[in-house]
Image: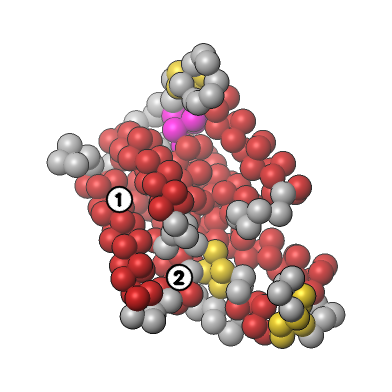
Amino acid sequence: MNNLPTITKNLLIINVLCFFGSIVARRYGIDAENLLGLHFFLASDFNLVQLVTYMFMHANFQHIFFNMFAVWMFGRVLEQVWGAKRFLLYYIVCGIGAGLIQEGVQYVEYLTTWVNYDGVDTGAGVIPMAEFLNQLTTVGASGAVYAILLAFGMLFPNSEMFVFPIPFPIKAKYFVLGYAVLEFLLGVSASDNVAHFAHLGGMLFGFVLIIYWRKKNGGGQQIFY
């Protein structure tokens, strides 16, 4: 940990502390995920600050492990290239952007599916619409993590990576592109309670931010090829 860049190390620490803190809080009757997770903006429990706090909440150990593994593996490289301030800005902006995209997707779904109903059948019975909207909660750093993956693929496109279960190395640019296509396909077809479009939203905001920095000729060291 001592060899990690400052922001990467602190992001890992804060996320882990928040994860275990939410477990402890639950034992005292406090639902930290409900308080700090990102609610649908039409829900009564929505708070603007949740666009930031939701990034530090995770649903389970597997969720936080894979997100933080990606931050450790790729985030430290970006921080070394960009510096602490630019990397932190990128992480937060892309995380917020992912949340905004998720809100937009949920709003479209609301308009096309639920807007004319007073309640929703969840399978366990019909609940009032107001209660249902409060259940639309997003948690996790995945949007920011997917932005980190995108940035790594843009900065080091020809770096070769071993990705299980593929038995041969794959270039970073193809790895990132494959992930983006997979997330899109899952987003339009799967019903797995995973915010696939939030992942794509993080990548979209990351792409825009990197292109902006490139045009301003200040994207850290110019390692774009």
Q: Nearer the viewer, residue 197 or 34?
A: 34
The amino acid type, in three-letter code, at marker 1 is: Leu
The amino acid type, in three-letter code, at marker 2 is: Glu
Q: Nearer the viewer, residue 225 or 128?
A: 128
The residue positioned 22% from the left and 40% from the top of the image is: 4
Q: Position of residue 102 (x, y in %)?
A: 61, 60
What's the CA distance linking mark 1 and mark 2?
A: 18 Å
Q: Position of residue 60 (x, y in %)?
A: 44, 57
Q: Quick check: 188 above or below 150?
A: below
Which residue is denoted by mark 2 in the rendering? 33
Q: From the image, which quarter does the N terminus lie in?
A: top left
Check disc 1: other Cα within 10 Å, few if <14, some if 14-19, many if 20+: some
Element on which disc 1 rests: helix
Which residue is denoted by mark 1 in the rendering? 12
Q: Which residues are magenta?
A: 151-155
The colour scheme of the drawn protein is secondary structure
Q: Earlier in the sequence, mark 1 or mark 2?
A: 1
Q: Main secondary structure of the magenta part?
A: helix
* Outermost residue toward the front in this view: 124
Q: Quadrant of residue 22?
A: bottom left
The residue positioned 35% from the left and 67% from the top of the image is: 23
Q: Position of residue 36 (x, y in %)?
A: 44, 72
Disc number for residue 189: none
Can the viewer see residue 33?
Answer: yes
